[in-house]
Image (cartoon, coloured by chain):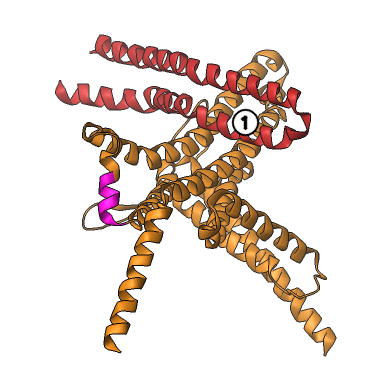
Chain colours: A orange, B red
Amino acid sequence: MEQKMNIRFKITDVLYLIGAVLPFVFCMVLKILTNTPSEGINITGAMIYFTIPMPLQNLLITEAQINSWAVIISIFFLCLYFTHGLSVKANLKRQIIAEWIVEKTQSLVSTNMGDFFKGYAPFIAAIMGISAFSSLMALLGLYAPTSDINIVGGWAILTFALITYYKLKGGLGNYLKGFTEPIFVMLPLNILGEVATPVSMAFRHYGNVLSGSVIAVLIASALQGLSNLVFGWLPGILGDIPFLQVGLPAVLSVYFDIFSGCMQAYIFAMLTMLNISGGFPQDEYEKRLLKKQSKKNKKINSKI
Amino acid sequence: MALAIGIILGCCALGAGICMGIGAIGPGIGEGSAVAKACEAIGRQPESKGSVTSTMIMGCAIAETTGIYSLVVAILLIFVAPNIFVNILKSAM
């Protein structure tokens, strides 16, 4: 009986791992099938696979969307793999890794956002994970979803909605009053500042990842020209092989893809935490809570 | 027509160069002073190296934002804007 369970456990493990890897393979196959090889410097946006007609505007299904869904599915299966076979005594290595991740994000959230926002640890971990995985996708030669402004803009709008929701917890009057804070003349500037938060977050993340990919393309084409110049005298097909393109771009991708991608994920999550907890009016919220409770108590008392 | 297209392409390239050149000054000075202060702090208190470094990288990335804006504008000017401007010109002709 035990051995049967063991075999079943291992089969599920393998299935989860396949589920985590398969989306990336699917994206690569799709890219190989649809992309046409091009010479020289060629920088374009995400490729549009097909369009869905919609009443207001046609919905474009692009490479960026498909890749970001692949990242989501892959992270889902990785989470399943890491939490498979949990026990009180951690006897699997992956449980220790999973516990480490959970503890780290919880301590990060509780030091940066305070105890009121303790439940935000999964949200912050999700943002960090999806952002880091999306940026690291460029290592596989795929189109990184974060170098499309629409994807990152969507996350920034989500953050903006959360910020506004927590600002409104202090009451609508206080929220509107906050726009005329030092003097009434500052109203347009304050509204601009409110809108600038998500825009700057989106542009920071997208610009950093995009600059990495643009510089990679420029350097690759420059190396091709240089190797044509240096090895062009070699006979036959040997002269056409760009020898200098081997290895050198990989050194740059250590900075632009790995370091910059993880950095931007951390910064996006950090700014999300700081903006949400910074806009939340703690004192007003507690006052309102007390008022509501006293009203409730009065009602109960009058009924009695 | 050829002259007009030439002027458009040249101005786009010139604009991208000026945008990137001026836009890189601010973040450069800002990040340089931030790193200098962080080095001072680490020299004074070597045991706080970890937290100072992480805070510095965070601040650097935020100070970089305006530079990134100018980079995005420069990329748009080089790769996207010429097509749009030339199309506008052709439709107006």
Name the side, left or right, on which A145 lies relative to B84.
Answer: right
Tag 1 subunit: B
Residue at (62, 65) in percent of width and height: A77
Q: Which residue is mark 1?
A: B56
Whole-percent x, y for residue A187 in the image: 24, 36
- In the picture, the quarter occupied by the N terminus of chain B is top left
The secondary structure that dominates the magenta segment is helix
Residue at (60, 39) in percent of width and height: A263
Foreground residue, A166 or A270? Answer: A166
Is residue A224 in view?
yes
Residue A96 appears in which quarter of the rendering? bottom right
Q: Amino acid at mark 1?
A: Met
B56, above or below A176, in the image: above
Name the side, left or right, on which B32 lies relative to B84.
Answer: right
A291, above or below A39, in the image: below
Farthest residue to the left: give it. Answer: B93
Secondary structure under the numbered disc 1 in the rendered image: helix
Residue at (70, 75) in percent of width and height: A12
Whole-percent x, y for residue A3 in the image: 84, 84
Foreground residue, A219 or A113? Answer: A113
- In the picture, the quarter occupied by the C terminus of chain B is top left
Magenta region? A171-177
Foreground residue, A15 or A161? Answer: A161
